[in-house]
């Protein structure tokens, strides 16, 4: 589908409304503003990659829709989504009825998207997550390089860029505060959980970036994580008597 | 009271237990770990100031106890505190009975502190807050310089150091996440609220530091706030299409 067509514009607007409705109650680490940042970052990466290699077969429609819908069905927030949908009067969306593996495809089909596009966007969305990739990195590589989903590389990179740098730092602490003791390890609801998360996940994302554009942006933001962690350790050393 | 006496050690341990109990349910921006960092920072400042000016009349007992107790009675968390106390079986501590202006003094008296010490610590604790100082900066200056509460300068500086730098950044976003829409302005629960808070309050704290030691430490941490805000603005510019 041509992204400049009025048909695509109508579909994209309907999906924007859907995302805003589903996620408006989420804490600011995973709310509509996060999604719209990822959508913009995906557009930036897409344009840069297309300029560098104009013959690369990339569907702008898939990139745009998958970036917009990438957090729909996120298990961390599914109960909230179910409750929101239920309050809006849709009797078919209680928790038991929600299958996170098909939510995006169904929403797109309901809004009139061609089945092939809806299916392709669902596949990309279902494979964006870091956890999914860690479980089976070969699957992600095959999808991108062999199976015809090069758009997945762009959406992954965009989502991961919003997880690092100053914005990633802000999102991690916000999530800690919002999730309460669920985020805590061994019952310790402490900010140190966030610094562990930097080391265990966020500082590793740069090495998993798939596009040249994304990798360059990730380098700068990963340096920022390291600088911030250095500040943190110095301040904690003074404040806990460790130095 | 001599802080090396066993009498003081017993009192300090009782107050530590009291603080840990009152604040253990708080989100990590204002939990016991915050208090213990402030207590350590206050000790560091006290030692440095005493070295620089050995004749300065500073009570180590007042500094230590006021730093430890500085967030008891904080209105932001009072309902949580009341509920915690009520659950612990103390029928006299429902919300209606709590007067934040006397909580610290009563707790100290209950633990056997001399009335003059309890009263002095309460006065320091009651005047630590930024909001209190903004309402009447002359009152704070008089307390410190004329009325015999030079310890207030140290406890204020210690508390404000934990509000800036990397730790201050982490605490602000954690508070945003934990407080939910209560923190939001005009119903917008967004991370931008934190950046506004840096500009409106945190970046101004350096200019309000009272001790040389605190001012020097605040300079470094305030620079960090500025660097972080620069990163934030650059990343938000890219991610919102503003640049």
Image (cartoon, coloured by chain):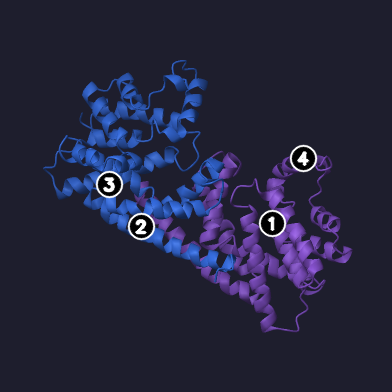
Chain colours: A blue, B purple
Return the chain for callout 3. Answer: A
Q: Which mark is residue B86?
A: 4
Mark 2 or 3, which is nearer the eye? 2
Q: CA distance from mark 2 to mark 4?
A: 46 Å
Query: Which residue is nearer to you in this view: A185 or B80?
Result: A185
Side (left or right) of A98 relative to B175: left
Dot 1, crowdedness within 10 Å: few (<14), some or many (≥20)? few
Dot 4, crowdedness within 10 Å: few (<14), some or many (≥20)? some
* Residue B7 found in image quarter: bottom right
Query: Looking at the picture, how far across and down is residue A8, in whole percent?
Result: 26, 28
Side (left or right) of A26 relative to B131: left
Residue located beneath label 1 in the image: B131
Mark 1 or 4, which is nearer the eye? 4
Asked if badges 2 and 1 are on one and the same chain, I answer no
SS at badge 2: helix
Q: CA distance from mark 1 to mark 4?
A: 29 Å
Residue A192 appears in view: yes
Query: Looking at the picture, how far across and down is residue A148, in whole percent?
Result: 17, 35
Dot 2, crowdedness within 10 Å: few (<14), some or many (≥20)? many
């Amino acid at each position: 589908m041509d992204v400049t067509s009025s048909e695509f514009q109508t579909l994209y607007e309907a999906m924007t409304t859907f995302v805003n409705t589903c996620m408006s109650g989420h804490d600011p680490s995973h709310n509509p503003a996060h999604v719209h940042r990822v959508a913009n970052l995906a557009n930036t990466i897409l344009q840069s990659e297309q300029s560098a290699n104009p013959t690369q077969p990339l569907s702008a429609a898939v990139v745009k829709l998958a970036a917009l819908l990438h957090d729909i069905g996120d298990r961390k927030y599914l109960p909230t989504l179910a409750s929101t949908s239920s309050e809006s009067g849709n009797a078919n969306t209680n928790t038991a009825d929600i299958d996170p593996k098909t939510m995006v495809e169904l929403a797109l089909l309901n809004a009139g998207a061609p089945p092939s596009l809806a299916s392709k966007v669902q596949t990309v969305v279902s494979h964006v997550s870091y956890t999914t990739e860690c479980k089976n990195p070969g699957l992600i590589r095959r999808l991108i390089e062999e199976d015809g989903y090069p758009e997945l590389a762009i959406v992954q990179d965009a989502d991961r860029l919003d997880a690092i740098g100053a914005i990633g730092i802000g999102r991690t602490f916000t999530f800690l505060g919002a999730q309460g003791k669920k985020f805590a390890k061994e019952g310790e609801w402490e900010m140190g959980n966030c610094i562990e998360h930097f080391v265990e996940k966020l500082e590793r994302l740069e090495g998993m970036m798939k596009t040249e554009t994304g990798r360059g942006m990730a380098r700068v933001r990963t340096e920022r994580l390291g600088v911030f962690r250095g500040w943190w350790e110095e301040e904690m050393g003074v404040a806990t008597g460790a130095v």
